[in-house]
Amino acid sequence: MKETLHRIAAAGGMAWLAVAVCAALAAAAFPFDAAVAAWVKGAVREEHHFAVHLVGNLGHGVALGLIFVTLAVLYGEERTGVGGLMAIITGGLTADALRMLFNRTRPDGDPFSFPSAHSACAFAAAAVLARRWPRRWYLFYLAAAAVGGSRVLLLKHFPSDVLAGAALGITFGLACAAVADGMRWLRDPETMRWVRGLLASMLVLAVIAPEGLPDPLGLLAGPAVLLILVRRATSLLEPQLSHDGQS
């Protein structure tokens, strides 16, 4: 336990500073939320909503799960995949619990505004990916910021909701990435065969679920699942095909 906590504390570096900055900015932005929402309502045209909505869908938990399952199953990034899935699940569920607790009204009149779950999931994913590919950290966090900004432009969240979600997401991303790095069973090849199969099954279930994937990401789900399953089946058959060829 002590080793895990030490790994979490050492995982983020400057990212932990970003958590503190986002939390402080969320508190500072709270008095200006209503004014920003009023400006957005008059400035953003309805014909731009589709493009903004498309960006926001990248923060959907299923869409991010598709990314991490693909990394684990197709590219052998099991630790990144497992850490990312842990981060978006725990971060998203925590954000949902807090939204019900605070029960803040959204700018468009709907309930459960604070904090933004889309932002929490997006920044959780960014933290995991930035830990794996630190030289590209700015790309991951810019994408997460775009998701958060889209939620403000769509009047789904206030700026403070997004900033609080960002702080929450980075926290869970750093913690889950560090925990996944310490999972020894992720180093066992036989265990990983089962993990990859489980992750592929989760993806299939997500696609055929009644709610489906957010459009237009749903259009990519079928080919993505087919590609993953074919690639996985091919990797399982390679030893047998090689043996048959030698005999």
Image: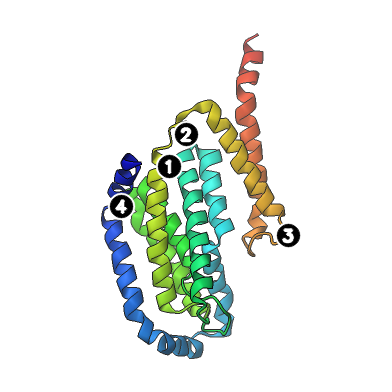
Q: CA distance from mark 4 to mark 1?
A: 14 Å
Q: CA distance from mark 4 to mark 2?
A: 21 Å
Whether label 1 touches label 2, CB < 8 Å: yes
Which residue, given by chain and number where applicable, does mark 3 sit on? Answer: 210
Which residue, given by chain and number where applicable, does mark 2 sit on? Answer: 186
- List the single residue furthest toward the top: 247
Q: Is residue 192 left or right of residue 19?
A: right
Which residue, given by chain and number where applicable, does mark 4 sit on? Answer: 12
**Of pointers 3 and 1, the one earlier in the residue sequence:** 1
| Residue 180, disc | 1
**Of pointers 4 and 2, the one earlier in the residue sequence:** 4
How far across and how far down the image is residue 116, in percent?
48, 70
Amino acid identity at mark 3: Pro
Amino acid identity at mark 2: Leu
**Of pointers 2 and 3, the one earlier in the residue sequence:** 2
Q: Quadrant of residue 162?
A: bottom left
Q: CA distance from mark 2 to mark 3?
A: 32 Å
**Of pointers 4 and 1, the one earlier in the residue sequence:** 4
- The answer to whether residue 145 of the structure is visible from this angle is no
